[in-house]
Image (spheres, rainbow, N blue to C red):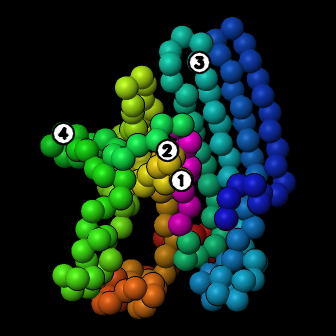
Amino acid sequence: MYSDNAKDVKTEICQNQYGGTIDIKYTFEVPSNIEKRKAQIVDGAVEVHIVVTVPNHKPVIEVKLEVNNYAKDHRLRALIPTNISSSFSISDNQFGSIRRDVVDSAIHVWEKEGWDERPDSIYPMLNFVGLSNDNYGVSILTNSTREYEIVGEGFDTIAITLFRSIGFLEKRRCYADQVGHLGLNYQHQIPKCSEN
């Protein structure tokens, strides 16, 4: 589901001598839990409030995001298009920065080698992730989220995971190509990031 499915959209644009601000509020209508998602019943909601500030004095776009989540068993991500097609990303870790392929090369060998889980290209980060080419680059700096993926037809969009609202740490047979288990089979008493 993408924000083009949003309801109750309210936008306010302000500009002064110091920069511009866009204040955006909307509501996603989503299934309230995994069972409703399977049945394609949309009966939950996620309220989003975004404030985008573009200062005149520095080459940075500041984004503040506030979310009220009323659904379980889903992930919310922000997709940031960069127009930089790339085969790799750069992000930070505890000891410096790391270059990662946008598609994990193990995807081509995991079945032949008998792995229990299919590898994916969702990676951890601490404070930043970026894409670049010979002319310019785009980086996302955050003090909250710690997970990203490079997506899009040309691998030119940075997908930042804002949160996961889950009831189980592991779901058995989530994917057709899953061989073993994904994580621990443990149920949370109250799913994280839910106001139900």
Disc 1 element:
loop
Q: Which residues are magenta?
A: 75-82
Disc 3 element:
strand
**Is the Cβ of the residue at disc 2 closer than 8 Å to that at disc 4?**
no
Q: CA distance from mark 3 to mark 4?
A: 29 Å
**Is the Cβ of the residue at disc 1 closer than 8 Å to that at disc 2?**
yes
Residue drawn where x is 46% and y is 41% of the image: 85
Q: CA distance from mark 4 to mark 1?
A: 29 Å
Residue drawn where x is 56% and y is 61% of the image: 76
Indicate yes or no whether the magenta region holds residue 78: yes
Amino acid beneath label 4: Gly
Amino acid beneath label 2: Asp
Identify the image quadrant of the N terminus.
bottom right
Q: Which mark is residue 96?
A: 4
Indicate yes or no whether the magenta region holds residue 17: no
Residue drawn where x is 15% and y is 43% of the image: 95
Q: Which mark is residue 130?
A: none
Q: Looking at this rendering, what residue extends furthest in the top direction?
A: 17
Q: Identify the residue position indicated by label 2 in the image.
A: 156
**Is the Cβ of the residue at disc 1 closer than 8 Å to that at disc 3?**
no
Amino acid beneath label 3: Pro
170 lies above or below 67: below
Q: Nearer the viewer, mark 4 or mark 1?
A: 1
Q: Identify the residue position indicated by label 3 in the image.
A: 55
Nearer-N-terminus badge (3/2): 3
Q: CA distance from mark 1 to mark 3?
A: 31 Å
Q: Identify the residue position indicated by label 1 in the image.
A: 153
- Give the image location of residue 107, x and y in percent: 31, 70
Q: Nearer the viewer, mark 1 or mark 3?
A: 1
